[in-house]
Image (tube, grey):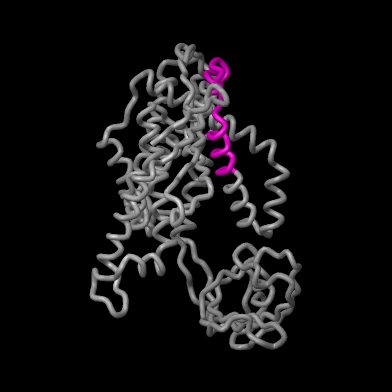
Amino acid sequence: MNVNIEEPNSLRRKLTIEVEPDEIKHELDRAFNELKRGVVLKGFRPGRAPRNLLERFFGEQVRGEVVQKLVKEYTDKALEEHNLKPVAAPEIVTEQTDLQKDLSLKFSATFDLRPKIEVKDYEGLKVPESKVEVSDNEVEEAIERFRERQATLKKIEDRTVVEDGDYALASVEAFVDGKPLSSTRPEDRLVEVSERALAHGVYEVLKGAELGKQMKASKTYPADYSHKDLAGKTIEWRATAKEIYRRELPTVDDDFAKDLGDENLEAFRTRVRGELLAHAKQEANARARQGLLDIVIERNPVELPESLVARELSAMEAELHQTLEAGGLSHENASERVKQNADDLKARAEKRARTGLIVDALAEQEKIEINDEELGERVAAIVTQSGRNRDRAAEFYRSPENREALRQSMRREKALDFILSRAKREDAATEPK
């Protein structure tokens, strides 16, 4: 392996790597021999297919896989030999390669190094001592939210017309030019009849519907409508309500409290107040940590690696695009909105990259680590709180990469808590919840 190292700037490195022909031949032979043991070709016993036929049927695929394997293997080897630690995955560019004609492989790996940072002036910073309180009104509002979640549905027997706010057992179909939009047979389902819950015009056709009578309403959608199946079409909605239900809220009393696991209503109020107070303190501490972190960042200028900023920017653009589409914008309009916010996103990406670098450097300075027991407890808590998605969350954190990403996040949390623990508390006005 021949390696040439270029240094475009103080952080950027470009490795040009050339793999020896003998290494390429060895890897190709290994790949074809492995393929030969597993593949079955008509007219040949398992493991007996000749190399020339394997080349004909699978050559392009095998050579592509060999190139990928060699590129990763030799990039990792070169980084280790030269003690280089990229801050983000290297950008790989492979020269035009045809291993069938020429046993040569040359490629480049361009990346940025993590800057060496010694974090200074982070001890003894002043932070307001927030006096967090929870009002009686806030407690009542929280109890009302519990009450909403415990609501039940009661079937309405004394009227036959669906009103706003009802729940209706109904079948809904969409037609275009008299033909069903979907080939799926409509099924009765329970829906909340409100503008908030029913989109695309379904609310209008169900509100005021009579039980057992098919109601119809047409609506034309613009070409850039967020729901692609409806965009640019005139849809005739047909809905038939079968049953009407109304939500009933439980009475807030001792029985209500017992259903939620408390001894009586007073004990339930005490628990709710405690949970609100704990949450308010967490938010106050989060604001204090962010304020302190902004000061530390200002006092510790950092040269930002281009690739790290690019990675953060790409993630933020994707997140904003997804949020805009979920809010009803078309793919094209969401992309345009992302472009309009390019400068703001770039500034936020730079701040996020700078924050990560400084917090990681501080954690290293103070030898802050997250052990396996702490990581396991956090994973267990996340899985427990995932409810119906518990199995999916558990599977996600079986991945070593995802567990290490969580470990890094926890390490940064602990580093921020360290800064807060070294700050000087000062009296301040009472913090609202």
Magenta segment, which residues? 294-316
> Does residue 406 lie above or below 123 as drawn?
below
- Left or right for 404, reference 117: left
| Image location (x, y in percent) of residue 253 | 40, 54
Which of the 4 image quadrants contains residue 1? top left
| Image location (x, y in percent) of residue 140 | 50, 45
Magenta span: chief secondary structure: helix
- Left or right for 39, reference 127: left
Q: Is 330 covered by the magenta stretch?
A: no
| Image location (x, y in percent) of residue 243 | 53, 81
Does the image show residue 255?
no
| Image location (x, y in percent) of residue 250 | 45, 60
Which of the 4 image quadrants contains residue 423? top left
Q: Is 312 covered by the magenta stretch?
A: yes
Instruction: Give the camera-side residue of 96 and 250.
Output: 96
> Does residue 191 lie above or below 303 as drawn?
below
Instruction: Give the camera-side residue of 52 and 332.
Output: 52
- Left or right for 424, reference 54: right
Instruction: Give the camera-side residue of 222 and 260.
Output: 222
> Does residue 160 lie above or below 319 as drawn?
below
- Left or right for 431, reference 71: right
Residue at (34% x, 45% y) in the render: 22
Residue at (29% x, 70% y) in the render: 49
Residue at (55% x, 72% y) in the render: 191
